[in-house]
């Protein structure tokens, strides 16, 4: 069996977790603080808050920015449900827009068409690890300042639409020489078990807000919000004579633990080797599929961008949704796990108020997409087995090619 995306767990990881367990400090503490500092150094952003999921990070930032019922948040139709769910939790109006024809990322043209005086946040999604066109998005929100109507203190201070990047896939990606996390106002990473860098479950908010914002102060605000609004975390309360605390707001509960951070610290130390290996697998797949006219390979590197090589999102030119599903079945019969990323939001019951026919690119790209295994421990022989199975399945289902 060739699995789709198992985590990289070895003795180094185990030793770091055991060290944490033996330290007597397993919830949020010194290793979480260290992990936050090292993410900030790696990404080049201004400050970082680690949490129990990327979803929590998106939710905290919408809360911090004062998003409420009647506001509008622009999201690509092609994304995981979390991006839309967090908007719905605040009672805001979810404004879905279509994606580019050439890749899976949000269309700048469609964003501009969707902006109104009620728009508070744009949430681009770096599908598969390829950064969105942040230069254009950042310029767009600056051009739309006159249309912006602030309704909270932080909105007044920023004076424009906030760009909140769903960078769940793109840790380690780059755009114009800068790392994901430092490309726009705020970026949110996922460290879920299947991600390039995993903490089993987890995520991080990479703060990069412009002046006059103090990102260090915002980090402190978010930490309070992530601990039920409590003014001190457990580590701070354990210092001599420092037990007394206050609850300053009705917050959430979504902090990261030191056990999770221990895994993340190991992953981050060796992350470049992970990226290098994933890139080599992309290169192998690209070479195997380059001579087949049914194969549309994912964009992973351009003059401006380099992906994190999170997902190899192969598209089968000419395949219908039903044929794509049959191809997946035939690949699975070879004991090879593949996947589809993603069912567009309008195709999910929770988002049934949106009609998929209004997002033709999202549906077209979803209908013939197959995600192939990419992970550090996947061998070249196994990658060749995957490619062989894909070629055989496609040529069986689409004999005209």
Image (cartoon, rainbow, N blue to C red):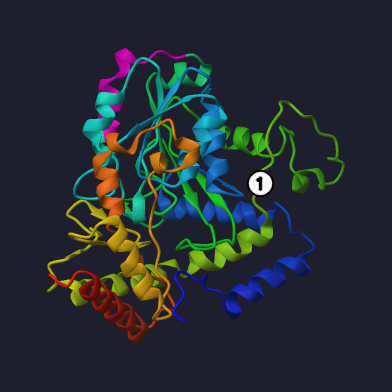
Q: Is residue 57 left or right of residue 242?
A: left
Where in the figure is residue 149, as x and y percent of width and height? Answer: 40, 13
Q: Residue farthest to the bottom? A: 381
**Badge 1 element:** loop
Q: How many marks?
A: 1
Of residues 159 and 336, the one drawn nearer to the viewer in this rendering? 336
Say if residue 312 shows up in the picture.
no
Span highlighted in magenta in the image: 137-150
Callout 1 crowding tier (Cα within 10 Å): few <14, some 14–19, many ≥20: many
Residue lying at 49% horizontally and 53% vertically, measured from the top left: 39
User: Looking at the image, is 258 positioned above or below residue 139?
Assistant: below
- Dot 1 corresponds to which residue? 255
In this rendering, position of residue 6 left or right of residue 279: right
x, y percentage for residue 86? 52, 36
* Left or right: 324, with 63 as reference point: left
Q: Nearer the viewer, residue 166 or 348?
A: 348
Q: Position of residue 27 (x, y in %)?
A: 73, 54
Residue 33 in the image: x percent, y percent? 62, 51
């Amino acid at each position: 069996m060739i699995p789709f995306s198992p985590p990289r767990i070895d003795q180094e990881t185990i030793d770091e977790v055991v060290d944490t367990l033996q330290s007597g400090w397993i919830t949020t503490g010194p290793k979480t603080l260290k992990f936050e500092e090292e993410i900030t150094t790696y990404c080049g952003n201004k400050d970082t808050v680690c949490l129990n999921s990327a979803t929590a990070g998106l939710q905290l930032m919408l809360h911090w920015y004062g998003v409420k019922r009647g506001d509008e948040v622009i999201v690509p139709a092609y994304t995981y449900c979390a991006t839309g769910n967090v908007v719905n939790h605040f009672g805001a109006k979810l404004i879905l827009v279509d994606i580019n024809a050439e890749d899976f990322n949000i269309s700048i043209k469609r964003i501009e068409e969707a902006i109104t005086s009620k728009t508070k946040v744009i949430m681009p999604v770096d599908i598969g690890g390829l950064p969105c066109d942040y230069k254009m998005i950042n310029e767009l929100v600056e051009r739309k300042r006159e249309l912006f109507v602030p309704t909270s203190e932080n909105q007044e201070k920023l004076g424009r639409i906030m760009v909140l990047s769903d960078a769940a896939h793109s840790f380690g990606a780059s755009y114009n020489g800068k790392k994901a996390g430092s490309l726009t106002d705020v970026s949110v990473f996922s460290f879920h078990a299947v991600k390039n860098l995993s903490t089993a479950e987890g995520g991080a908010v990479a703060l990069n807000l412009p002046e006059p914002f103090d990102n260090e102060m915002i980090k402190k605000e978010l930490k309070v919000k992530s601990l039920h609004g409590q003014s001190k975390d457990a580590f701070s309360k354990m210092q001599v004579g420092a037990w007394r605390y206050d609850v300053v707001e009705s917050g959430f509960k979504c902090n990261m633990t030191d056990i999770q951070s221990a895994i993340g610290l190991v992953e981050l130390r060796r992350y470049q080797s992970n990226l290098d290996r994933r890139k080599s697998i992309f290169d192998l797949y690209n070479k195997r599929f380059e001579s087949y006219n049914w194969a549309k390979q994912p964009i992973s590197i351009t003059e401006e961008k380099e992906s994190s090589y999170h997902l190899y999102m192969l598209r089968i030119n000419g395949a219908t949704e039903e044929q794509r599903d049959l191809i997946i079945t035939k690949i699975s019969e070879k004991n090879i796990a593949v996947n589809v990323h993603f069912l567009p939001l309008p195709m999910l019951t929770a988002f049934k108020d949106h009609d998929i026919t209004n997002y033709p690119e999202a549906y077209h790209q979803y209908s013939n997409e197959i995600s192939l295994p990419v992970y550090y421990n996947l061998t070249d022989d196994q990658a060749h087995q995957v490619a062989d199975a894909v070629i055989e399945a496609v040529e069986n289902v689409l004999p005209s090619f």
